[in-house]
Image: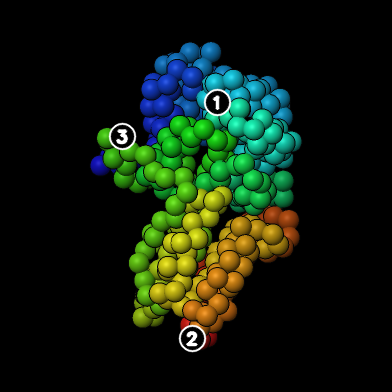
Amino acid sequence: MALITFREALNQAMDEEMARDENVFLLGEEVAEYNGAYKVSKGLLDKYGPHRVIDTPIAELGFTGLAVGAASVGLRPIVEWMTFNFGLLPLDQIINNAAKLRHMSGGQLSVPMVIRGPNGPAEFLSSQHSQSFASYFAHVPGLKVVAVSTPYDGKGLLKSAIRDNNPVVFLEAEMMYGMQGEVPEEEYLLPLDKADVKREGSDVTLITFGKPVHMVLEAAAKLEALGVQAEVIDLISLRPIDEETLYKSVRKTNRAVVVDEAWPIASVGSHVAYLISKNCFDDLDAQVEFVSSEDVPMPYNHTLELAVQPTVEKIVNAAKKVLYLD
């Protein structure tokens, strides 16, 4: 397997799907001439030309709406939002058009499009540019929502998302684009509706998605030094949630900690904690613990910025609590 970066894995996925299907095209701010704000689309303009790799105005509502229309008549747009913080502007197009056109047309229309870009806290971006919006999209029937944490998952899931006949919200992370991982050189696809067991364990289940997966794996390693074998579940699919994988793990370990870098109220993590509490009640030996960002806007000061987010220490302490080790 080749060792490549997360951005290279995403680039390969788009390149392969654009070569495979002439109806696939990419649009967004700086995706063409500048090779993408995070260089994810590097080289695609030279290879496919300006009719398939399109620089847009700074108008997310406009170009997202254009993509919805294009998808509804048979094209397969990939919309890159420079950050999901800018995705607040086109929410009307996503929620009221992309997610509902198949339902409202009685199945006569489909909207095969992908909306992708960095989501969640980054560094030194303060209150308006360092937020997690996963739950905004996971809340909406008609969308598929996935969050990726490795180059391997990124490539396989993006290819599947591009081929899917439904609108797919594809959540990446700014801090992960340079992260390296092994990716097969042969073609592969991954399912959009399955969680992944990133680490097997028997004592406690740690559940998260996206960038925090790596933090949770680090916490699991620290717990192992205490004699605790933690199982790590990467949700990947936020809509639909792979409940079968969750419950199978929790019924084995009898304890669960959910980690989400979003605010706590009405988040994906809080919903997962509810599902486990409701459907695994008789299997639990302790209440489900939930580690989220603090319920405040993101500070700019770096010390405070780190303090309000989940940390390895917070995750370890939550696991110790459900294990009655604190």
Toward which corner of the image does residue 11 lie, by quadrant?
Answer: top left
Q: Earlier in the sequence, mark 1 or mark 2?
A: 1
Colour scheme used in the picture?
A: rainbow
Residue in the foreground of this view, choosing between 263 and 107: 107
Q: Earlier in the sequence, mark 2 or mark 3?
A: 3
Drawn side of residue 89 relative to residue 123, left or right: right
The residue shown at (64%, 45%) is 141
Question: Residue 5: image x %, image y %?
Answer: 39, 40
Q: Nearer the viewer, mark 2 or mark 3?
A: 3
Task: Please name the amino acid that badge 1 sits on.
Answer: Pro
Asked if residue 216 can be seen in this view, the reply is: no
Badge 2: few (under 14), some or many (20 or more) residues near its Cα, within 10 Å? few
Q: Describe the element under mark 3 as helix, strand or loop.
A: loop
The residue shown at (55%, 25%) is 77
The residue shown at (44%, 61%) is 245
Calculate the distance from the C-alpha at mark 2 to the C-alpha at mark 3: 46 Å
Q: Describe the element under mark 1 as helix, strand or loop.
A: strand
The residue to which callout 2 is attached is: 325
Task: Please name the amino acid that badge 3 sits on.
Answer: Glu
Calculate the distance from the C-alpha at mark 1 to the C-alpha at mark 2: 51 Å
The residue shown at (56%, 45%) is 145
Q: Is residue 137 above or below residue 21?
A: below
Asked if residue 206 can be seen in this view, the reply is: yes
The residue to which callout 3 is attached is: 187
Question: Residue 281: image x %, image y %?
Answer: 55, 77
Badge 3: few (under 14), some or many (20 or more) residues near its Cα, within 10 Å? few
Q: Looking at the image, do the residues carrying marks 2 and 3 touch, with CB atoms under 8 Å apart?
A: no
Question: Residue 75: image x %, image y %?
Answer: 54, 21
Q: Describe the element under mark 2 as helix, strand or loop.
A: loop
Q: Earlier in the sequence, mark 3 or mark 1?
A: 1
Calculate the distance from the C-alpha at mark 3 to the C-alpha at mark 1: 21 Å
Which label is found at residue 77?
A: 1
